[in-house]
Image (cartoon, grey):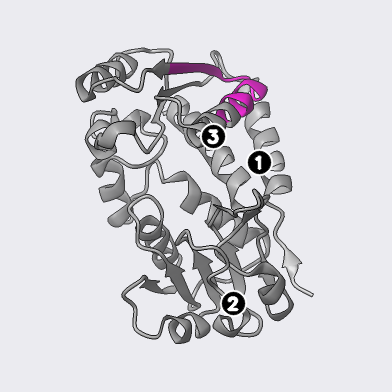
Amino acid sequence: MATLIDGSALAKSWNQAIAAEVRTMPRPPGLAVVLVGQDPASQVYVKRKGQVAHRLGFHHLQIDLPETASLDEIVATVRRLNDDPTIDGILVQLPLPGGLDGRLVTEHIDPAKDVDGLTTANVGALAQGRPRLVPCTPAGVMRLLASVDVRTEGAEAVVIGRSNLFGRPMAMLLEQANATVTIAHSRTRDLATVVRRAEIVIAAVGRPRMVGADWVREGAVVIDVGMNRLADGTLCGDVDFDAVEPRVRAITPVPGGVGPTTIAMLMANTLQAARA
């Protein structure tokens, strides 16, 4: 029977430690979240972030801009937050509506307040092995692996997905932890064979239950970053949990695995920025 990596319980523990430190600070860390438009999923994510920030004693500011907001208007909002001494972390909820380029907006965030870790300055520092503010989901995955005593040094890891938001920074963190890392993707030849040789499998492709039992070696550790809503309204990951779970040493559920730790790492990054 695989160990179930309970991200909800771990995030609760990490958040309790953050809240304890916040109570000792001369002023609370400040987190500002910019939401453009009324995308339902984005509204849910932003609401959850605000709830956690409030619970931990942060100064939290949510700025709602209309669907029709221009790139210049969004950038002007970011610049005001850059200059606000009560705000330590700035997050612009992505994707932006109307085909607006989120990367252009992100580049206007002060790297010292870039708690998503997405600016070129922070990504470059990570690539050079000098991490400052690290993308939240990959950082949370590293802590999930540590929670079940996964030895990354010398281990073979496969990251399925090569996005700038997750896949590439995830691979960098694993490589810096001395794992041998393969980034797999839709163009990878014989993807199942590539995944099968890994001791650590991290799936982030957005395809429901793509990773089946025959893709995973016995005793592997599987981290499922996917979150897919099926036709009946239920949620599932990129891994076929029921089929894979009997074969592996440890696995994250969906929901309740990676998601809560991403928000916890956002709070940790905001605290780090406030201390700097």
What is the three-letter code of the residue carrying label 2?
Gly
Q: Which residue is mark 3?
A: 45
Q: Is residue 180 placed above or below 162 in the rendered structure?
A: below
Disc 3 secondary structure class: helix
CA separation, marks 2 and 1? 31 Å
Of mark 3 and mark 1, the one earlier in the sequence is 1
Q: CA distance from mark 3 to mark 1?
A: 19 Å
Q: Nearer the viewer, mark 3 or mark 1?
A: 3
Residue 118 sits above or below residue 248 on the image: above
Q: Earlier in the sequence, mark 2 or mark 1?
A: 1
Q: Residue at x 63, y 70 (%)?
A: 240
Disc ID at residue 212: 2
Residue 256: % across, % down: 68, 50
- Residue 100 horizontal side relative to residue 22, left or right: left
**Is 237 on the left-hand or right-hand side of 189?**
right
Left or right: 158 with respect to 75? right
What is the magenta range? 49-63
Q: Which secondary structure, mark 2? A: loop
Residue at far right of view: 1
219 or 111: which is nearer to us? Answer: 219
- Percent from the top left, x then y, of residue 215? 55, 81
Element type at marker 1? Answer: helix
